[in-house]
Image (tube, coloured by chain):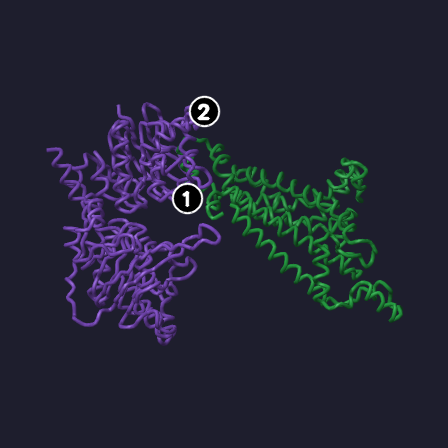
Chain colours: A purple, B green
Amino acid sequence: MSLLEIEDLSLSIGKAPILRDVDLRLDAGEVLGLVGESGSGKSMTALTIMQLLPHAARATGRVTFDGIDILAAPEAAMNRLRGDDIGMVFQEPMTALNPLKTIGEQVAEGIRWHRGSNRADAEREARRMLDRVGLPEAQFPLSRYPHELSGGQRQRVVIAIACALRPKLLIADEPTTALDVVLQKQILELLQGLVREDRMGLLLISHDLAVVAEMADRVAIMRAGEVLDTGETARTLSEQRHPYTRQLAMASVHVPERPAHRPHGTAPLLELRGVTRDYPLRRRSLFGPAGTFRAVDGVSFTLAAGQSKALVGRSGCGKSTLARMILALDAPTAGEIVFEGQDLARLGTAGMKAARRHMQVVFQDPYGSFDPRHRVERLVAEPLHLAEKRPGRAEQRDMVAHALHEVGLSPSDMDKYPHEFSGGQRQRLSIARAIITRPKLIVADEPVSALDVSIRAQILDLFADLNRRLGLAYLFITHDLTVARAITDEVIVMHEGRFVEEGETAVVLERPRSDAAKALVAAAPDLSRAIAQRLAEAG
Amino acid sequence: MASYLAGRLASLLISLVVASIVIFLVIEVVPGDPAQFMLGLNAQPDTLAALRTQLGLDEPALIRYFTWIFGMLHGDFGISYTYRTPVSELVAQRIGVSAPLALLSLALTVIIGLPAGIIAAARRNSATDAAVMGATQLGIAVPNFWFAIMLVWIFAVILHWFPAGGFPGWNKGIWLGFKGLLLPSIALALPQAAILARVMRSSLLDTLGEDYIRTARAKGLPRAQALWKHAVRNALIPVLTIVGLQFSFLLAGGIIIENVFYLPGLGRLTFQGITQRDLITVKTVIMLLVFAVIFVNFLVEIAYVLVDPRLRRRA
């Protein structure tokens, strides 16, 4: 009998059906990858196993863990299982820990609760576990608080909590989605090691086919609450017998068709010369000197009209600070940013208006960047206040209709509210808002990292298409090399505020020279590489 | 921590100085001559002038301001124009009523409000929740003097358990004094407890939706344990601010209740001071209240740092 068996599991919340006839099984020591796009029911399947569903949820079918009928188990029995025999790791490490309790307390708490051990014993056990997840005592004493740790370190604490009692089953729900690729690799390796050492079963939930291909022995592919395809990882992903599996695999390696950029030999659209940005640090004493932190350290580059460049680097490397300065939302401490031949720092109000009209921005989160109470017409028309002459009402509607048409939406969407659109459509809206002033440059900060793979492929196509038709230049800020590979001519690798490598995208990603670039390339999950490796291992 | 405390103290002092200047200036421009009031409308101009000199009213404003400030620093608040006794004695008597009243009301507010809010949040959408929410709605809508009248009617007039009003003084024994203050403090506390319960409920509901509560549940903690060990302390952070504001209100805002129960408190002293142009008393009482409010805020800020480790680094 398997460690975990799910048969004919159906779930509804209120009247909405969430899961339909889900069948899954997982053996001890095995890694099962559960893949699907948002809303496919992956997380709800996990929460059903944990019995941490919302109040109105009703589940039918059978979920058996280690011989225990989970759906029929009373709450007290579930409390004994959770954290002891079943551990769970969540997506967002920044908010997963209680900010008012030390990491030692939080790891020891589960041990004390389940084992009834005294504080000293539980803390000794917690210490051992934190050492195992790579948080040694010297830098990470038990008395540390979560806010003193980075995202990756916090995820290690969450993993320590989940694995402290050597559970038989570990559920990891998108454990690395909020982390950059280098951290992602570290956390995945940590999970792999723990699972192997303690012979845990791991249910790994992810939207990223490449991550699952690298980690899982078997995969199950979900869509709209159903398991469509399941089987051994290498076979399932290489043979791609189910059309949806094929569709997902194609989308995750999608590269839009795009003619190579031919430089015109004219003056660059954007030029940075020795741009530096210092932030003051908090004073250590009342009268001591205030230190500074150099977020961006003397960087220079040029971007030609119609060119597409990626700025890649790990989180905290200074790429977003640089983007803010290019958008004139922040001023450099030293150096110049020249846009269309003019130094941004010396522009007056009118000049700045013109500059802003010619450069627009697309952000990561299509949910957070719209006022939910405004209609699409008003949202998309927002940048028009930068126009030399504010268009009249009819003209404005025409312009909005045209912009919506350009991004593949219907002009009739103009009178809707943002909540009526899906995530991908909302990202189209933010692109429509960006192109309405006919800009020359678009700065896109992780524009597709919040999107599902198939939507993401469509948005990348849209970026490519607009680049070709409107001659837009792009600066893509990303930690995701597949985005850089898909859509840019050149790439700049940034590390600790400096540019450590620049060049043609294909060349840099194929043969990175600097350590930072090598680390990024090595850590980036790669679907075809992972499948090839698994097939080779299987012989 | 030490430099944080020093910084907070400095800001407290600056607030006090600014407040003292504002109070002094406002009292300056208020119409009405205290000497005229004391002597009546038919006073002779030379007696009036003599009294003005005696009270120091003919000095330049700047001198009077500093005399006032330095006096207060030495515990000398001047002589009341109407009562002809030192303001310090007057105020000390009244604080003996108002401060215990405020503290008692605050204690009741917290004892009633916090548990009510916690229970309502823990049993969200249940009958208990609905009952608590209905009661707090009523508590906020009904003015506190109505509660006061009802309390007097039930406990004093019908049951004879408590006096209907007046304050016997602390020298008659602590128990009698406490009995005299209990009904008024309940009347003061009920609307405040209703506000606090609602704030606590919504803060706790927000906290219960946080990811770290899910982490605690995934650890195996039952719902109640996750609530007590993880949610309540986090939920208290915004509630602290409200409690601080409520204490200030209870200290200064008891005037209607003091009148209903005929209590010799600061509120009535201020009210009489204003109507009789006893400006020196008014000035002093207002200054004291401002000091109390600023000091309570100072305490709340220190409490934040004690509760929240994220602020400790900045501290």
Cα separation between marks 2 and 1: 27 Å
Q: Can residue B97 be seen?
A: yes
Label 2 belongs to which residue?
A118
**Front-lying residue, A39 or B221:** B221
**Quarter of the image that includes the N terminus of chain A:** top left
Q: Position of residue A223 (x, y in %)?
A: 27, 43
Q: Is residue B313 left or right of residue B24?
A: left
Q: Residue A381 lies in what quarter of the image? A: bottom left
- Residue kind at label 1, given as amino acid type: His
Residue shown at 15% from the left, 43% from the top: A529
Q: Can residue A57 be seen?
A: no
Q: Is residue B236 left or right of residue A416?
A: right
Q: Are marks 2 and 1 on the same chain?
A: yes
Q: Position of residue B299 (x, y in %)?
A: 59, 46
Label 1 belongs to which residue?
A147
Q: Position of residue A91 (x, y in %)?
A: 34, 42
Q: Residue A525 lies in what quarter of the image? A: top left
Q: Residues within 10 Å of mark 1 (few under 14, many from 20)?
A: some
Q: Earlier in the sequence, mark 2 or mark 1?
A: 2
SS assignment at label 2? loop
Q: How many marks?
A: 2
- Residue kind at label 2, given as amino acid type: Asn
Chain of the residue that carries numbered disc 2 in the rendered image? A
**Quarter of the image that includes the C terminus of chain A:** top left
**Front-lying residue, A67 or B58:** B58
SS assignment at label 1? helix
A424 versus A192 height, above or below: below
Q: Return the residue found at the far bottom.
A: A389
The reply to whether dot 2 and dot 1 touch (C-beta < 8 Å) is: no
Q: Position of residue A318 (x, y in %)?
A: 31, 55
